[in-house]
């Protein structure tokens, strides 16, 4: 269960190395898909995924 952005990054170490634009876009798409899928059954996970998306988009992981 993803509860925080930090947990998400620990689960996916490649999230910290996203200088390649296509990799970054892939991570953003994954975060969006997780948020959409978990919206009803796991709102906390959906919120964490949206936060991860925003941080990747704004390049503020860490």
Image (spheres, rainbow, N blue to C red):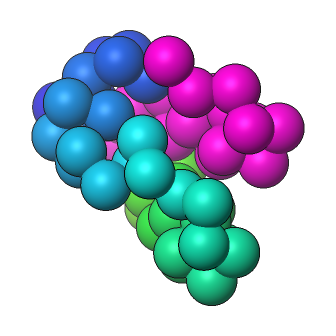
Q: Is residue 44 left or right of residue 23?
A: left
Which region of the structure is painted magenta? 39-62
Q: Is residue 26 left or right of residue 37?
A: right
Q: Who's the residue at 83% across and 38% down the image?
A: 58
Q: Position of residue 28 (x, y in %)?
A: 62, 62
Q: Position of residue 55 (x, y in %)?
A: 69, 33
Q: Who's the residue at 61% across and 60% down the image?
A: 19
Main secondary structure type of the part rendered in magenta: helix
Indicate yes or no whether the magenta region holds residue 58.
yes
Q: Quadrant of the N terminus?
A: top left
Between 9 and 51, the residue placed more toward the observer is 9
Res. 62 in view:
yes
Q: Position of residue 40 (x, y in %)?
A: 47, 44
Please tell me in which quadrant of the rendered image residue 9 appears.
top left
Q: Position of residue 7 (x, y in %)?
A: 26, 23
Q: Who's the residue at 54% across and 57% down the image?
A: 18
Which residue, as the protein is rendered here, is positioned at the far right? 58
Between 36 and 13, the residue placed more toward the observer is 13
């Amino acid at each position: 269960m993803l509860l925080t952005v930090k947990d998400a990054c620990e689960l996916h170490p490649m999230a910290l190395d996203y200088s390649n634009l296509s990799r970054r876009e892939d991570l953003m798409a994954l975060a969006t898909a997780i948020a959409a899928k978990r919206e009803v059954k796991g709102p906390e996970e959906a919120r964490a995924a949206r936060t991860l998306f925003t941080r990747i988009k704004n390049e503020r992981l860490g």
